Image (tube, rainbow, N blue to C red):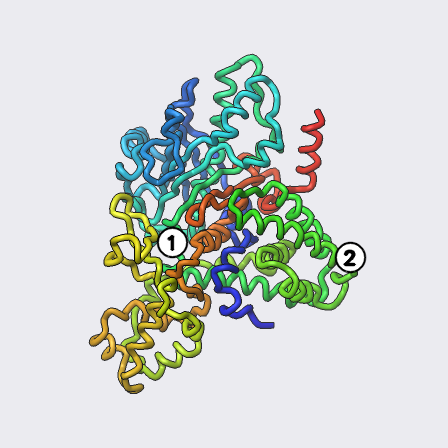
């Protein structure tokens, strides 16, 4: 059985329907923390009754320790904002490489609360900030201070008490470069330092809420019930800054998608599932359906997709009632049926569900999702233009379907803002600045490369061509990657007026493991991370990887709480 071809997978609309899966980076992290018996300590807590002060959480593994350094602030609610241009936050954080001493904490306190205006060092792996949920934070404190549990319906509907607005790593603002830590086993998989940072921020947030409730009512306050506590994740607001990552890291994108497609291929090839595998799939499908009931979005397009997904998963459940799972190669048959009958949202949800019973087949693929991008950066100048044309014909035929003579097909341009050094999209015919355009219009640039090649002889070398046409270097490099990395390109026009940047955001966030994807416009989105996951102190007591869909017991517990 072959992998799904890039022509199917690498369309923006399908990438924008991806869901979290066993290969998502959060799940890889928790499986490792559990398997290696990592130990966690809150080594410092100096917050006052208003929740202002310092805290340090240290995670210790087989070879080294990492510490989240948290600074909690007394923020005027009027200053609370999701926007990247904000200059003050409820809490700011750094992930320290090792265990900080007093001098480290003083240095970090002088810089981390300032975020972009400060500077950190190579001893820090990440820097982050977060704001309290206006809807839920105070409500939970009031309930706990009164000696009762908060409304589980509100917990489920919002999903988080704090929402990060940035988690920076990989050399930003002085932090350690990716290359300096990529050789560490625990950080080799993509974004493990960032995921650990968010995981520890979640622990800090819940401790902060319970601390404030206790300070408000020492005689009456109660902690959050463990089952309800786990249903609180960390929110995140993400905008256009994330979108170009997939275009600037083609080999990494290829490796992420190829791992997922290989996992799907392996499961579809299973001829006779065991009874436990069939039961697991049916249970995860039921859990997914229950979870969708708490996925809300006011964005018209996403709201419609959620409604369609609800109907499609009900149809999927009905399809199982005819005994399909007891036939030969049922997973392949189920996928083929879904491909013909269901929406993209449901098809890609099914891909994730099919992987759930098969950790023994797919989890090892997480080790293939990293990339040494320097190794693939060099251009092969000795390649003939005949070979280059052959690659273009085989891997970029999709570009010919785009009519770049129309204004709408060239309507947008990507640039980097001067104020925040963040990627932005401009309207080519209505806004200034297109001379600052970034080389992210892959399809247009490939079309221009093809046009420039037309008068050239097949026997000419790539080196000779680029001496005369250096403006095509970035496109030639991308084309030469295609045979080895077929999933490296998003096969759509990314400067078309009809582009939905949220599709690119959704793709990347699904690999993080995000849930409750909620676009606030076509250019930024809110998500939830680590909802239902065990906390650090619970990892040795519960399964590390049975939390990405709400348990059916969780739904029953919510009904019991509401009935009390």
Q: CA distance from mark 2 to mark 1?
A: 47 Å
Percent position of residue 472, x then y? 28, 70
Instruction: Determine whether, in the image, residue 6 is placed left or right of residue 156.
Output: left
Tally of marks: 2
Instruction: Determine whether, in the image, residue 464 is placed left or right of residue 98.
Output: left
> What crowding class fits label 1: few (fewer than 14 Cα within 10 Å), some (14-19), or many (20 or more)?
some
Q: Are marks 2 and 1 in contact (CB under 8 Å)?
A: no
Secondary structure of residue under mark 1:
loop
Residue at the extreme top: 219
Q: Is residue 124 visible?
A: yes
Q: Which residue is at 69% across, 38% downward?
A: 553
- Pointer 1: what residue? 182
Q: Which residue is at 43% across, 38% downward?
A: 164
Q: Quadrant of the N terminus?
A: bottom right
The answer to which of 175 and 289 lies nearer the viewer is 289
The answer to which of 372 and 474 lies nearer the viewer is 474
- Residue 552 sits in quarter: top right
Residue at the extreme right: 322
Q: Is residue 368 visible?
A: no
Percent position of residue 422, x then y? 31, 48
- Residue 543 sits in quarter: top right
- Pointer 2: what residue? 321
Percent position of residue 446, x then y? 35, 71
> What crowding class fits label 2: few (fewer than 14 Cα within 10 Å), some (14-19), or many (20 or more)?
few
Instruction: Determine whether, in the image, residue 263 is placed left or right of residue 97.
Output: right
Depicted 537 relative to depicted 375: above or below:
above
Secondary structure of residue under mark 2:
loop
Depicted 388 relative to depicted 58: above or below:
below
Percent position of residue 229, x then y? 57, 32
């Amino acid at each position: 059985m072959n992998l799904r071809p890039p022509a199917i997978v690498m369309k923006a609309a399908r990438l924008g329907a991806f869901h979290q899966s066993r290969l998502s980076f959060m799940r890889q992290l928790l499986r490792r923390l559990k398997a290696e018996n990592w130990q966690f300590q809150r080594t410092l807590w100096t917050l006052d009754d208003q929740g202002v002060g310092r805290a340090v959480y240290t995670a210790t593994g087989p070879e080294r320790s990492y510490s989240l350094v948290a600074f909690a602030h007394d923020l005027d609610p009027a200053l609370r904002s999701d926007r990247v241009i904000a200059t003050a936050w409820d809490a700011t954080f750094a992930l320290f490489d090792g265990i900080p001493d007093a001098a480290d904490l003083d240095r970090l306190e002088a810089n981390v609360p300032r975020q972009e205006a400060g500077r950190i060092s190579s001893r820090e792996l990440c820097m982050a900030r977060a704001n309290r949920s206006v809807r839920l934070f105070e409500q939970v404190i009031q309930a706990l201070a009164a000696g009762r549990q908060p409304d589980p319906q509100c917990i489920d509907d919002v999903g988080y008490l704090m929402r990060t607005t940035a988690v920076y790593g990989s050399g930003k603002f002085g932090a350690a470069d990716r290359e300096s830590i990529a050789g560490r086993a625990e950080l080799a998989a993509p974004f493990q330092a960032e995921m650990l940072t968010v995981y520890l921020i979640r622990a800090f947030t819940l401790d902060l809420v319970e601390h404030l409730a206790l300070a408000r009512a020492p005689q009456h306050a109660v902690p959050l019930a463990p089952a309800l506590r786990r249903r609180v994740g960390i929110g995140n607001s993400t905008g256009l800054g994330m979108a170009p990552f997939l275009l600037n890291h083609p080999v990494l994108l290829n490796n992420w998608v190829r791992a997922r497609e290989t996992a799907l291929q392996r499961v579809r090839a299973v001829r006779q599932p065991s009874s436990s595998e069939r039961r697991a799939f049916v249970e995860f499908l039921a859990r997914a359906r229950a979870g969708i009931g708490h996925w809300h979005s006011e964005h018209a397009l996403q709201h419609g997709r959620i409604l369609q997904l609800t109907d499609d998963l009900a149809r999927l459940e009905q399809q199982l009632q005819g005994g399909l799972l007891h036939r030969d190669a049922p997973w392949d048959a189920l996928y083929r049926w879904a491909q013909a009958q269901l929406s993209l949202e449901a098809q890609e949800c099914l891909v994730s569900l099919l992987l759930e019973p098969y950790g023994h087949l797919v989890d090892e693929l997480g080790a293939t999702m990293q990339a040494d991008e320097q190794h693939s950066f060099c251009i092969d100048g000795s390649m003939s233009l005949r070979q280059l044309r052959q690659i273009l014909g085989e891997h970029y035929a999709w570009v010919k379907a785009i009519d770049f003579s129309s204004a709408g097909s060239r309507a947008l341009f990507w640039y980097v803002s001067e104020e925040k050094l963040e990627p932005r999209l401009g309207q080519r015919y209505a806004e200034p600045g297109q001379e600052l355009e970034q080389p992210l219009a892959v399809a247009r640039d490939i079309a221009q490369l093809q046009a420039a090649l037309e008068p050239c002889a097949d026997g000419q070398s790539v080196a000779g061509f680029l001496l005369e046409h250096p403006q095509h270097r970035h496109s030639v490099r991308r084309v030469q990657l295609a045979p080895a990395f077929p999933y490296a390109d998003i096969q759509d026009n990314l400067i078309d007026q009809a582009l939905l940047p949220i599709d690119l955001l959704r793709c990347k966030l699904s690999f993080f493991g995000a849930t409750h994807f909620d676009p606030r416009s076509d250019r930024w989105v809110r998500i939830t991370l680590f909802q239902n996951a065990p906390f650090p102190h619970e990892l040795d007591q519960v399964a590390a990887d049975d939390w990405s869909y709400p348990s059916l017991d969780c739904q029953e517990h919510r009904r019991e709480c509401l009935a009390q």
